[in-house]
Amino acid sequence: MITYLASVRQFQIDTPHSTYALAVVDEGYLCHVYWGKRLAPQDMTALLRLSEGPFVPSKNNRERASFMDCAPFEYPVSGTGDYREAAFGVETPDGARICDLRYVSHRIYNGKYKSAVLPHTWGNGCETLEITTEDKLLGLTVILRYTVFEGLDAIIRSAYLENNGSRDITVTRALSASVDMDDSRFEMLSLYGSWARERQAERLPLRHGKQRLDSLRGESSHQYSPFFALVRPETTEESGEAYGFSLIYSGNFLAQAELTQFCQTRAQIGIQPEDFAWLLQTEGCSFDVPEAVLVYSEDGIGGMSRTYHRLYSEHLIRSKWQYQERPVLINNWEATYFDFNLDKLKTIADEAAKLGIELFVLDDGWFGRRDSDNCSLGDWTPDERKLPGGLKPLTDHITGKGMKFGLWFEPEMISPDSDLFRAHPDYAIGIEGRPRTESRAQYVLNMARSDVRRAVWAQMKKILDSAPISYIKWDMNRQLTEVPSRTLWHSYVLGVYALMEQLVTEYPDILIENCSGGGARFDPGMLYYSPQIWGSDDTDAKERLRIQYGASLFMPPSAIGSHVSVCPNHATGRNTPFDTRANVAMFGTFGYELNVAQLSDEEKAQIPAQIARWHSISRLVREGALYRLGDPFRPSGYAAQMQADYDGWMFVSQDSMQAVFTYVQITAEANMKSRRITLRGLKPERVYHFSLGGEEYARTGAYLMQCGILIPNLWGDMKSVQIMFNAE
Ligand code: GLA
C-alpha cells in the first residue's frame, strides 16, 4: 500500500512487514525518511532533523553545504555540496558536472512500468509510486519509480531519464537505488569468488569509508555478485533484520555501502559509473535505469532470501518452464569435452535413455572445425567430420529413444580463426590500430550492432529450425576488453538482451539455460530470459555446497544449474559418494554431466531411483520455501563447535503439507553421536510422516521444530540423507 501524507509531503510505502518512507522537504529536495519494520501510516519526518537549525537551507542559506553533505537524499546528485557518493551525475558540453534535482510532481497507480529494453519484474497485484524530479537549468527530467507487489516485503526501484532541454546531456552515473540509512550498526553480507569458485559468502562489519563490490568486466562476473545485504550484528539465518540489495542487470555493476562522518550508511546499487556514459541528445531522448530490488526481512537472512526467491520466481522469470516439470538432462561436456563423434554420443545417449534420463545436451564442439577452444566461434554449422549429415542423424537417434535434445551456443563470441571473422573482422569489439586482447583464443562480438546480431541470429535460427531442439545452453566465456567507448559497455548488454528477447519470443517453448564460464552471469537480469543458469564449472559436491548456498542468498534455488559428475572430480580430484552428488545436485536443476556408459553397475542402478526422487521433490524446489539449516562456510577445527561440519536445507511447500530435508555430513569424526537438527517452516499443529533409518515416524510440526530429529553418524565424509515429510 502506498500513501501520501500531504500535510508533511511524505510518501509511505508499506509491504506486509516493512515500511519505506520518503518526503519532499524544503525547496523541493527529496529525502529518505525511514526503512524498516512496518509502521502505521504517520508523520515520520522528524527523523529528517530539519528543525535542527543549520540543516534547513531556506532558513539558513549560510549553511547550505552542511545540509547538502548530511541530509538523507533519496537520489543524491553531485556538484552542489553532497560529497558522499552520488547516485546520479551528468556532464554538459561545457564540461560541467553539476546537477540539481528537485521535486515536480508525483502519482500513485496500480501496475508498473515495463521497460522495452531491459529485463524487469512484471505481473498483477502491484502498485507504483512515481516521483518526477527535474533539473530546471538543464531541462532534465528524472522520474523515480517504486513498485511493490502484494504480499512481498520488496520494493522495486528504478529511474527514467528524459532530456527536455535544448542541449546535449551526457549521463555519467545513473544508479538504480541509493538509500541513506540513519544507522551504522550493520554488517555487510556479500559474495566473492573466482572461476569455478563462485559466490563465497562473506560477512564483515561496516567501517567508515566505502565498501564496494563491482564489475568492470562487461558481465556481472565470477568475482562479485550484484547483491549485498546489510544485517545487524545479531542477525542470524532465522532472526533479526536484513536489508537486501539486488540488481536486475547483467553488465558492469556497483554495489556499495558508505559509512559517513555522521555514522549514517549510504547503500547503493546500479550500473558501475566508471565505464559508463550515455548521451541524451535534446528532443525527448530517454534512458531506462535497471531495476533494483530492495528487500527487508525481520526473519533473518533466510527471510530475505525467501522474499527474493518468490519475487524472482513469480515476477521475473517468464519462461513457461518455471511452473513445469523440467526434463532431467545429461550433458556431454565433462564426458567428452571436444573429443566426440556420432557413435560416442549415441553410446552415451543409449545408456542415458535406458536409465530414464530425459534430455540429451550436446555441449561445445559440434560446429565449424572445433576440436579445441582455438577456433570456429561464429561459424554455427555442424562439423560434418564429427556429425556426418549434420545434427539430424543424432537428433533422430535421440528422439527415437524417447529423449529430447538440447544444444550449446556461445552467440556473443567470435574466434579469430573463423569464417565469420575472416569475412567481418569489424564485427569483433576492438579499437583501430590496437591489438585485440584474446581470451580463451576468442574475441567478443559487438552485440550493440543490429547487423552483427542479425548475422548471428540467422545462423542460430537455421540450426533451431533444422532439428527438434528443446533446450539451449547459452554460454559466454570471456570478458570484454578494448571497448571503444563508455557507451558500448551498456549498449552491449542491451544488445545481448535484444537477441535473447528474439530467441524467447520466436521459440517460447525452448528451455534456456544461461551460462558464462560457469557462473559469471548468475544474475537476475538473465532470469528474465532463462529460468536456469549454470551455477559453476566446479561440479564437486563439497564445493557446490558453498557455491549453491551463496547463490541462494538472492537467487531462487530452482535457477541453479547443478549436475552429478564423475569422481575423482575434474575440478578438485575429490571422491564423493554418488548418492551425495545427486542429493547436492537436487539443490538446483538436477541433471548429469558424465559418461553414463562408463559408470559402475552399482552407480547406474541408482540413477532411475534418483530421477524418480527428483521428480517427487522438484516442485518443492521450484515453488517451495527454502530453509537453510547448516552453514558450509563454518570453519572446521579450532574455531568450530564441538561437532563436525555439516550442511542441511529444507524445501517446504507453500501449503506446508510437504517438505524435504537434505542433510550432508561434511566431515566425519571419531566417537560421533547422532546430531539433533531442528527443522523449520512446518505447521506446528500438523502431523508429519517420515522415515529415517528404516523406521517410520509421525510427529507434529511443533515437535520437529522444537525437539528436532536425530541424524545418526553417517560414517564418512560427505555422506548424506534426504528425508520426505508428508502431512496428514
Ligand atoms: C564453459 C561452460 C562449460 C562448457 C564449456 C564449453 O566453460 O561453463 O559448462 O560449456 O564452456 O566450452
Image (cartoon, grey):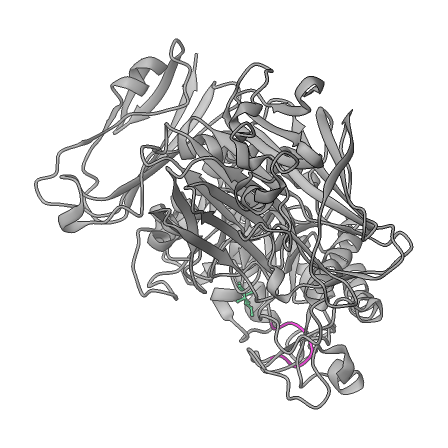
Is 124 above or below relative to 501? Answer: above
Is 728 above or below relative to 240? Answer: above
Residue at position x 71%, y 52% in the image: 99
Residue closer to the observer: 414 or 105: 105
103 left or right of 63? Answer: right
Identify the magenta region: 365-370
Residue closer to the observer: 608 or 454: 454
Does the magenta stretch mainly form a helix, a strand or a loop? Answer: loop
**Quadrant in which residue 362 is drawn:** bottom right
Residue at position x 25%, y 29% in the image: 693
Residue 484: horizontal and vertical position, in percent?
70, 76
Residue at position x 70%, y 52% in the image: 470
Q: Is residue 572 magenta?
A: no
Residue at position x 56%, y 36% in the image: 55
Residue closer to the observer: 270 or 92: 92
In this rendering, does residue 553 appear at all? no
Residue 468: horizontal and vertical position, in percent?
74, 55
41 left or right of 383? Answer: left
17 left or right of 401? Answer: left
Quadrant of picture, ligand 1: bottom right
**Quadrant the N terminus occupies:** top right
Q: Is residue 367 magenta?
A: yes
The residue at the far right in this view is: 283
Residue 624: horizontal and vertical position, in percent?
51, 29
In this rendering, does residue 168 appear at all? yes
